[in-house]
Amino acid sequence: MKKENSSDKKKSNSPKAEHTSQDKKFLDEFLAVVEKNLADPELDIEAICKKLVVSRSTLSRKISELTGEGIIEFVQSYRLEKAAQLLRDNYGNVTEVAEAVGFSDQFYFSKCFKKKFHQSPKEYQLDHLNKSTGDSIIKERLKKQTTAVCPIAELDRELVARGAPMMAAQQLLFNGMEGTPQSQEIFRQVMEYHALHSTLNEALKHFETTELTQKIRLMIDEEKSKPRRNGIYSDDRLDLFDIFDDRVRGNALSIAVVCMYVDLLPSGSGYFRLKTKNYGKVFNLHVSEPFYNQPAAAGPMCTGVLVGKDIIATAAHFTNGKNITDLRFVFDFVMQDPISPVEQIPQDNIYKGVEILERVHNPENDWMLIKLDRNVTGREIAVLSQRNIFYEQPVYVMGHPCGLPLKYAAGATIEETTANYFLADLDVYGSNSGSPVFCAETHELVGIVSRGKAVDFRWTEDGWITLRYAKSDPDYKGSQCSRASMFEKLLT
């Protein structure tokens, strides 16, 4: 969030006691702009004035009259109130909450938050989490922890208590740095965390951290051999060559890698090559992990889906909107068979972003529509569903998790719906943002992935393994998806 000049704060200590209907309409329009751009740290007075089509002086005067506060003071207070709500709802960690309400500087966010609520964001979150969790859940967990075989999630929580969250975050930093001093330093930090023996679980205190990580890997390996509906430990993702349903394969043609132009290298004769790394090696995965030897995009990327002849829908948080012409949309990055990825991409399959038609980024909405430099030919446009989505509706997701060639994951269901988004138990990972979610029965587009809530990886001495909590676990949360109906009317 930008820090504004204090001269912009023309505070009135005596706001109007009553407002006219026009005043209320103006304030509602102002709040709608703020809410729609809540996660945008670049939102400033000039941007608000432009969206409301008013002068800076008029806006300043009106907000002062209606709220008794200056514009920046009021907007910041609004952001902080939203942040408090997200922390109470356990939306994510402090960094995720700060970004969700438009603060790009976590230190500045914490400073502002503490000034307003007299607690740090973390203290505030823990205080409300403890109140909402209740003694009954805590006692139930302790009861489970004293059994001979701990649930996987309980073992993972024990690792979290010993510093594992830092390891999970650090693993993503290996991308593009394998074999370098930087990666060696990260390894050193990982091993330091694993050497910690502080614990919150009396029943497990006699286990070394290394013993716990070995145990959790063996348990996960065992769970992966079971049917998926037992929990979420198994991996349902398939490559395109393993898909035989023509309707699913048709939808696959509408999906693109969204990357930066610098990550495409010309290889001659009208072909390009996407910069890639070996997935297993670059992420230091355990050798048993699926797709270990496949290529993964080396640079920042996400997934997009074709929703118009020259329009892509994807996640808004991938770009701030200022670098749109640097984005490239690459179709057909797939595995042709178990060992042969598509390495040479014809220029005809690569498109350039030219304009953002609409972008909405806040805790409940995370999507944008991008106009391409030309019409896309020879591909099916995803059909947006006109039907209402519903609880336990079967769905599937397709995209590029962790930058891998296109993957298809079925067997999921919708778990919760709101006016703006829904939650589903999808097999999604990092870089799955923007991935289309289709109804399994009609094969129509019902949403795009905004964010995942499941744990992706955990360190086990022999490499990272995928780790996901069972739906019955108290810490389980489904993946949040923006509803396609939010942008469907813009395409007609």
Image: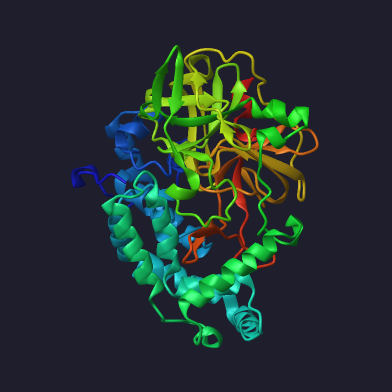
Q: Is residue 119 left or right of residue 349?
A: left
Q: Could you tell me which residue is drawn at 55 percent across and 17 percent down?
A: 310
Q: Residue 60, how many percent across, how many down?
A: 30, 39
Q: Could you tell me which residue is drawn at 63 percent across and 54 percent down?
A: 478
Q: Residue 366, how many percent across, how many down?
A: 52, 40
Q: Could you tell me which residue is drawn at 34 percent across and 47 percent down?
A: 177
Q: Residue 358, how many percent across, how many down?
A: 50, 28
Q: Could you tell me which residue is drawn at 77 percent across and 39 percent down?
A: 440
Relative to 91, say whether 398 is above or below. above
Relative to 370, say whether 179 is above or below. below
Relative to 138, say whether 228 is above or below. above
**Residue 15 makes an appearance in the image:** no
Q: Nearer the viewer, residue 58 or 210?
A: 210
Quarter of the image for residue 256 reads top right
Q: Nearer the viewer, residue 442 or 487?
A: 442
Q: Is residue 332 left or right of residue 20?
A: right
Q: Residue 80, how many percent across, how many down?
A: 39, 56
Colour scheme: rainbow
Q: Residue furthest front?
A: 339
**Residue 447 makes an appearance in the image:** yes
